[in-house]
Amino acid sequence: MDLRRVLLLILDLDDTLFDCAGTLVPAAHRDAAAALAAAGVPASAEAILAARLEVFAADARADVDAAVCARYGVTDSRIAEVGRRAFLRREVPPIEPFPGVRETLAKLEGRVRRVLVSVGWPETQRRKVERLGLGPLLDRTLYLAPKSKGGKEVAFRSLLNTEGLRPAGALVVGNRLDDEIAAGKRLGIPTALVRGGELGALEPRGPDETPDVVVAGLPELLPMLGVA
């Protein structure tokens, strides 16, 4: 696939531009477990934490909080939401981008528009970008709340319209086969999977989850985009 005519780079954040799984996720699991225990799940925070990790290990695509609540006989969806919010809304400690991310984004300035589209608690995602120092290296940032209507597919379609581009003029870059990669594929946008993070071992479940390019990190895309 020839990516040298790409004019718009649509970027995911977590585990695409920085190591979210290794730096923030363990503490977020602990926060969520404590919140679920406090909200009425009949188990200790330690037991709930073990259950969360077990559910995720068995199925990385699962709704972890709903599964944990079901395991303990909790049917009130509001309690699962308490865990979900605690997982997403935690404080952000100092973090660093993956090697070469800043340099890659800088080299693309003026050549390819760099737009971040990230799903999560908006204030938390915004704080991550600030901590990473990536704001000045992005042309635009879009923060989508979890379960926002249409999700990334609607956001990507809107970006194409705003930029006046056909799908072939953009490239979606992310680590989630079932999220940004699938959304890009459904719209006919070329996709690049950054292999890694919590979901790095997952395999595509069909054509909609099969990326056009697989890379170890963002810098590998430079020559494909025709940038020295």
Image (spheres, rainbow, N blue to C red):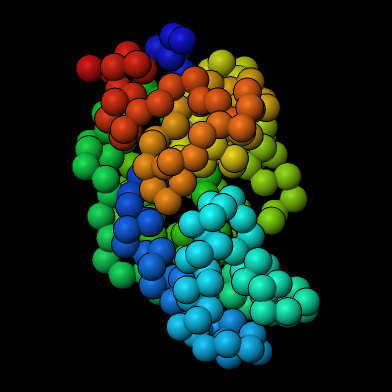
Q: Residue at x 38, y 36 (%)?
A: 195
| Left or right, residue 144 beside residue 132 | right
Residue 31 placed where, x, y %?
47, 78
Residue 113 placed where, x, y %?
44, 30
Q: Is residue 116 visible?
A: no
Asked if 192 appears above or below 202 in the picture, the reply is above
In the image as oriented, which residue stretches furthest toward the top?
2
Residue 152 placed where, x, y %?
63, 42
Q: Is residue 95 visible?
A: yes
Q: Quadrant of residue 183?
A: top right
Asked if 61 appears above or below 138 in the picture, the reply is below
Residue 97 placed where, x, y %?
28, 49
Of residues 20 and 202, the one nearer the viewer is 202
Q: Residue at x 69, y 56 (%)?
A: 147
Of residues 196 and 172, the one nearer the viewer is 196
Of residues 54 and 187, the one nearer the viewer is 54
| Left or right, residue 73 beside residue 91 | right
- How many labels sit on residues? 0
Q: Residue at x 22, y 17 (%)?
A: 228
Q: Quadrant of residue 168?
A: top right
Q: Quadrant of residue 180?
A: top right
Q: Residue at x 49, y 20 (%)?
A: 212
